[in-house]
Image: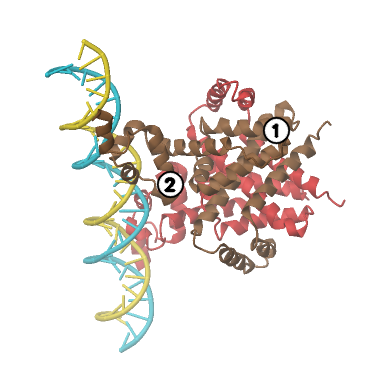
Chain colours: A brown, B red, C cyan, D yellow
DNA sequence: ACACGTCTGGAACGTCGTTCCAAACTTGGC
DNA sequence: GCCAAGTTTGGAACGACGTTCCAGACGTGT
């Protein structure tokens, strides 16, 4: 019996940074943001907490690595449903939706991306994916950084807030009931101080988060084309 | 000597939810997000941790109350520098800047606002302040909720990310040096994979976060007027 | 076979959020 | 003006966390 085989008998496989990050993603997805513990992760990997620290510096680095893995996977999976020769706008919508869905599936990614500083590996990925389309839309070179940054900030911020909202009600709770409760609270506000919120409360009842997110992206794109009309 | 006076001798003043929230804001501002501890707060208030729990349910509620207090103060302080009869766009810019500056001064507010779910008290404040201007801009009634939500999401998301970025470098560190370091990393990326990010790295060097944030707001407003032109 | 660097994992430390409870204080009825 | 009931206080204690430490198991070159 080879040494590897004997070791495999002790534990399914050798520890590695990649295996740890994968396990961390699994724990985060099932137990939520607060569920990621070095003890829980140890159990998941059939080892002790100390062993993990040989491959990962601390919890922050682990969270960052997990976030980067999810973002990279989301951006790499090119949606096959786009047109054969998509416009820059269509491409931006596709990137935005890919991120939205990824954050919706892994809500802890949203917190990490919007709360922590821009990471060395993740930020260039996002900037590159959206920036190329900004460039293709005819935005003058001097504005590339500003426009792209703003777009990425909206995408991450809106997706993070949606994920946070979706998380307060468990997977079992009824979304319509929840929205109705909030709308009722809004409609009961003081008419003097909250005339707008009262009226708008009813519009919240049936709304779709994904559509609203896409509407925001479209509003942004409309602003870009209004400011820098295509030469055509 | 009255009982109140004797109590005042023991501790400067009686405990109350408001005093606790104020102390929490002070601790958060000086020690940062991780510095808010029930023990540190106890010391600040010259009491024990148990006493605080009589007025506040848990740490989350305390953070929410502190966030709401800061947002309410920011929105209540009407900026005096606006024109005598400001346009809806100017009003939105003022609200957005007030929130940006508040989050810049209290970075922990950004994390709280974008990471946690919309709070019962804070969200109506924000919706009302921006929604009235959206209505005044001539957006059709059916789109009020969507447009206002998107606008608020951008404002909160962008401000939170700026605050997070500003926090990684301490108050003493040099911002230009930091930006230069990041730009250098970007410019050293693989030309095959990151052509856009490499080019755009230099634009990051001198950029101003506040201006970039305002440019995003303006882009949004441009999108709104492009989609629903004013009847004039 | 032996020694050395790599990797493991259980024990232990300090700190956190939170709970508990005895004592101090306030209040209302006599 | 006093005493019982209720309110508020704050120190001690509990369990869980992130992290460190280190004795030993493992792999590898001589």
> Residue D25: x percent and y percent?
19, 32
> Residue B210: x percent and y percent?
63, 37
Chain under numbered label 1: A
Classify B137 as above or below C29. above
Which residue is tagged 1?
A: A134
Residue B135 falls left or right of residue B163:
right
Residue B212 falls left or right of residue D16:
right
Chain under numbered label 2: A
Q: Secondary structure at mark 2?
A: helix
Q: Secondary structure at mark 1?
A: helix
Q: In the image, are marks 1 and 2 on the same chain?
A: yes
> Residue B91: x percent and y percent?
72, 49
Quadrant in the picture for the C terminus of chain A: top right
Q: Nearer the viewer, residue D22 or B93?
A: D22
Residue at coordinates 40% horizontally, 60% vertically from top-left? B15
Classify B31 as above or below B149. above
Q: Is residue A154 visible?
A: no
Q: Earlier in the sequence, mark 1 or mark 2?
A: 2
> Residue A169: x percent and y percent?
51, 59
Residue at coordinates 35% horizontally, 43% vertically from top-left? A41
Residue at coordinates 59% horizontally, 57% vertically from top-left? B123
Crowding near the residue tagged with mark 1, few <14, some 14–19, many ≥20 C-alpha atoms within 10 Å: many
Q: Is residue B39 visible?
A: yes
Quadrant in the picture for the N terminus of chain A: top left
Residue D3 falls left or right of residue A219:
left
Residue at coordinates 65% horizontally, 44% vertically from top-left? B97
Crowding near the residue tagged with mark 2, few <14, some 14–19, many ≥20 C-alpha atoms within 10 Å: many
Q: Nearer the viewer, residue C19 or A65?
A: A65
Which residue is tagged 2?
A: A28
């Amino acid at each position: 019996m080879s040494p590897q085989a004997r070791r495999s008998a002790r534990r399914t496989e050798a520890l590695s940074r990649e295996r740890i990050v994968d396990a961390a993603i699994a724990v985060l997805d099932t137990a939520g943001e607060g569920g990621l513990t070095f003890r829980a992760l140890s159990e998941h990997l059939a080892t002790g907490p100390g062993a993990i620290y040989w491959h990962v510096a601390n919890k922050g680095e682990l969270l960052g690595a997990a976030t980067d893995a999810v973002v990279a996977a989301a951006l790499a999976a090119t949606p096959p449903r786009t047109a054969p020769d998509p416009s820059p706008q269509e491409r931006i919508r596709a990137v935005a939706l890919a991120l939205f869905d990824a954050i919706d599936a892994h809500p802890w990614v949203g917190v990490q991306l919007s709360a922590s500083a821009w990471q060395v590996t993740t930020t260039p990925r996002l900037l590159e994916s959206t920036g190329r389309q900004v460039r293709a839309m005819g935005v003058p070179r001097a504005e590339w950084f500003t426009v792209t940054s703003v777009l990425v900030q909206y995408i991450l911020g809106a997706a993070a807030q949606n994920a946070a909202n979706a998380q307060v009600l468990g997977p079992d709770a009824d979304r319509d009931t929840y929205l109705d409760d909030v709308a009722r609270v809004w409609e009961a506000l003081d008419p003097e101080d909250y005339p707008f919120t009262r009226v708008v409360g009813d519009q919240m009842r049936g709304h779709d988060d994904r559509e609203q997110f896409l509407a925001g992206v479209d509003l942004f794109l409309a602003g870009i084309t209004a400011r820098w009309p295509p030469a055509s």
